[in-house]
Amino acid sequence: MFENPEIALDELPAADDVAWQPLAANYIRRLQVQSLITTIIASLGVLVLQVAPLPIGQRWLFGLAWLLIVVGGVSGLWWPLVSVARKGYAIRDKDILYRSGVFWRTITAIPFNRVQHVETSSTPLDRHFKLATLQLFTAGGSAGDLKIHGMPADAAESLRLFILEKAGASIEHD
């Protein structure tokens, strides 16, 4: 028979007591390299467009474009230093937690018994830095899915196998 007993609020585990695992240290460098590549491509685009004839009254647009490229490039180098340090994940007995957010903090919990599929993926830049993304697909649609970018590739694969094992065990024993 199905039972759903009440749990006292003071018996709930505190999220502060969780041993958070940080993302890979070289994930910051990977994001910075991606920002540099984007900045270089945008700069080349503006340089090519500067060859095009524009009326004298509209030349200020190039100054604005260069300003945006500089601001975007500098923030692309600085922001990963701030944001990556505030992300992390934790593996507990029955779920995985993921925290993120600089201004608005979010903690997401995915129970293993809701996981239907787990995969790792990596871009060429990720592979250069030996990183991977772990993605969990849950029952209940995309709102319950979780992506953890910036994990060491070997840790992401080990965690993928672990979660699949836990998810399979919970399905067999439910």
Image: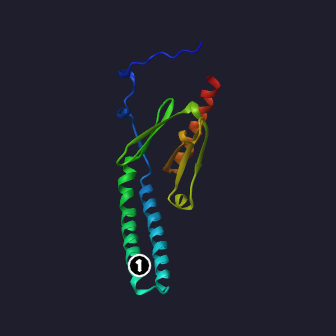
Return the residue at label 1: 62
- Percent coordinates x, y for residue 109 in the rendering: 47, 35
- Quarter holding the N terminus is top right
**Can residue 153 be seen in the rendering of this structure?**
no
- Percent coordinates x, y for residue 10 in the rendering: 35, 21
Q: Is residue 173 left or right of residue 18?
A: right
For disc 1, the neighbor class at 10 Å (few under 14, some 14 to 19, many from 20) is: some
Which amino acid type corresponds to the residue marked 1 in the rendered image? Phe
SS label for mark 1: helix
**Can residue 91 be seen in the rendering of this structure?**
yes
Please give the name of the residue rendered at 62% of the width and 23% of the height, measured from the top-left corner: 173
- Quarter holding the C terminus is top right
Decide: is 142 above or below 24: above
Please give the name of the residue rendered at 41% of the width and 74% of the height, measured from the top-left corner: 65
- Percent coordinates x, y for residue 50 in the rendering: 46, 83
Please give the name of the residue rendered at 39% of the width and 67% of the height, measured from the top-left corner: 73
- Percent coordinates x, y for residue 55 in the rendering: 44, 86
Please give the name of the residue rendered at 38% of the width and 52% of the height, measured from the top-left corner: 83
Decide: is 1 above or below 65: above
